[in-house]
Image (tube, rainbow, N blue to C red):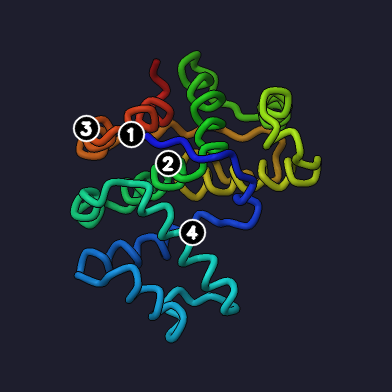
Amino acid sequence: MKRNKYSAGAVKFSFWFMEFRKEVQMLSSGKSFDEIKKLSEDENIFGASTPARAKMIYSTCTARIKSLDESFYPLFMDSDVSTQKLFALAGTLAHDTLFFDFVYEVLREKLIVGNNVLTDADFSIYFKNKQEQHEDVEKLTEATVKRLSRSYKTQLFEAGLLDDNNRAAERTILKPVLDPILKHWLDDYGYGQIAKALEGIR
């Protein structure tokens, strides 16, 4: 799995599952990325509030989709919604290395030891460690770190991995059950670390 440069872009991004699904559906039916981009610009197919927002949704969903091997399209289309959300999360994690590392280093370790509670302190410790180790992260302000933490929590909730108690300092981790088709695909196409992160295995 390719590791991209650490980015705080997630402060602006949502999980955008419905938009991700719509784009995969259109790709599966034979549309090209350029055609989908034009439809987004001309017809606002993602229902964005502004042209700038439409551009952001298209570019982010496209980057996430392109982070996965295109062989996932038919598997995605044949999956139930909970598995489709995990495919979308896999695309997000494959694209956003800072978010992936959080899930792999924090969530996965908690699942391994049987701890299903995610706290605000877990985010603080994670970002503090990254700031000490990486120049790219060191420059992030405290406000940006807080916004990233909120974004990660929201995306994990929308993917089905956190409870809905969004005002609490502690959130319950909901360990996903990976459909065997998704698990095998992740392992076969070089995304095995994502499978381990989601399942909480070494």
Helix, strand or loop for disc 2: helix
The amino acid sitting under disc 2 is Ala
Circle 3 Cα neighbour tier, 10 Å, few/some/many (<14 / 14–19 / ≥20): few
Residue at 42 percent across and 41 percent down: it is: 94
Image point 26% across, 30% down: which residue? 187
Discs 1, 4 touching: Cβ within 8 Å: no
For the N terminus, give its image quadrant.
top left
Using the numbered discs, state the Cα–Cα distance from disc 4 to disc 3 in whole angstroms: 25 Å
Kindly indicate the quadrant of the structure image that contains residue 106.
top right
Q: Is residue 51 above or below residue 172?
A: below
Tags 4 and 2 in contact by the CB under 8 Å rule? no
Q: Residue at left 51%, top 19%?
A: 109
Do the residues bearing badges 2 and 3 touch, measured as CB atoms within 8 Å? no
Three-letter code for the amino acid on which mark 1 is drawn: Tyr
- Choose the circle earlier in sequence order: 2 or 3: 2
Q: CA distance from mark 1 to mark 4?
A: 19 Å
Check disc 1: other Cα within 10 Å, few if <14, some if 14-19, many if 20+: many
Which numbered circle lies on residue 94?
2
Q: Which residue is mark 3?
A: 188
Q: Residue at x 67, y 28 (%)?
A: 134
Disc number placed over residue 60 in the picture, else none: 4
The reply, left or right, for residue 157 in relation to residue 185 is right
Of 8 and 16, nearer the camera is: 8
The quadrant of the image that shows the C terminus is top left
Horizontal arrangement in the rendering, residue 35 relative to residue 104 (left or right): left
Report x, y in % for residue 104: 49, 27
Distance between the alpha carbons at the discs numbered 4 and 2: 12 Å
At mark 3, the secondary structure is helix
* Contact between labelled residues 1 and 2, with CB atoms less than 8 Å apart: yes
Mark 3 is on which residue type? Asp
